[in-house]
Image: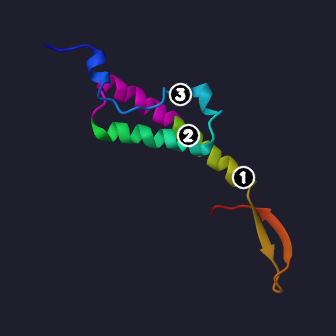
Amino acid sequence: MLQGPSHLDRHKPALQKPCMSDEFSELSFEDALKRLEAIVQRLESGNASLDESINLYGEGDRLRGQCEKRLKDAQMRIEKISLGTNGTVTGTQMFDAA
């Protein structure tokens, strides 16, 4: 006899409650990355139900986007320091990833 969701919930590793998209902007990059890593572990374990997997995948995708945005924002703020031949700073220019 199949048991309800409470039977399945006993075997879930403890994950924090899912984050809503407006909560992502409040997370630090490090916290968002930790949550994303926990989601990946849960999905890779194979112990998540189909519905849970779909929800986790969606949350993970939103977290990935938030992390990517924060990295791009940080990259735009980084300045490349130019040094002269004698080792003194001659100026700065915006970071160029290329």
Residue 78 drawn above or below residue 9: below
Which numbered mark, 2 or 1, is in the foreground of this view?
A: 2
Magenta: main secondary structure equals helix
Q: Residues within 10 Å of mark 2 (few under 14, many from 20)?
A: many
Q: Whole-percent x and y of residue 43? A: 34, 37
> What residue would you read off at disc 2?
32
Q: Please give the name of the residue rendered at 79% of the width and 64% of the height, measured from the top-left corner.
A: 93
Question: Where does the C terminus fall, quadrant-wise?
Answer: bottom right
The three-letter amino acid code for the residue at tag 3 is: Cys
Which residue, given by chain and number where applicable, does mark 3 sit on? 19
- Front residue of 10/58: it is 10
Q: Which residues lie in the magenta part? A: 47-62
Q: Cα distance, mark 2 to mark 3? A: 10 Å
Give the residue pinned by disc 1. 76
> What residue is at 57 percent from the left and 41 percent from the top?
31
Residue ranking furthest to the left:
1
- Crowding near pointer 1: few (<14 within 10 Å), some, many (20+)? few
Determine whether the residue tagged by mark 3 lies in a helix, strand or loop. loop
The reply, left or right, for residue 30 in relation to residue 15 is: right
Instruction: In this rendered view, identify the residue nearer to me: 61 or 49.
Output: 49
Residues under labels 2 and 1: Cα distance?
20 Å
Count up the numbered dots.
3
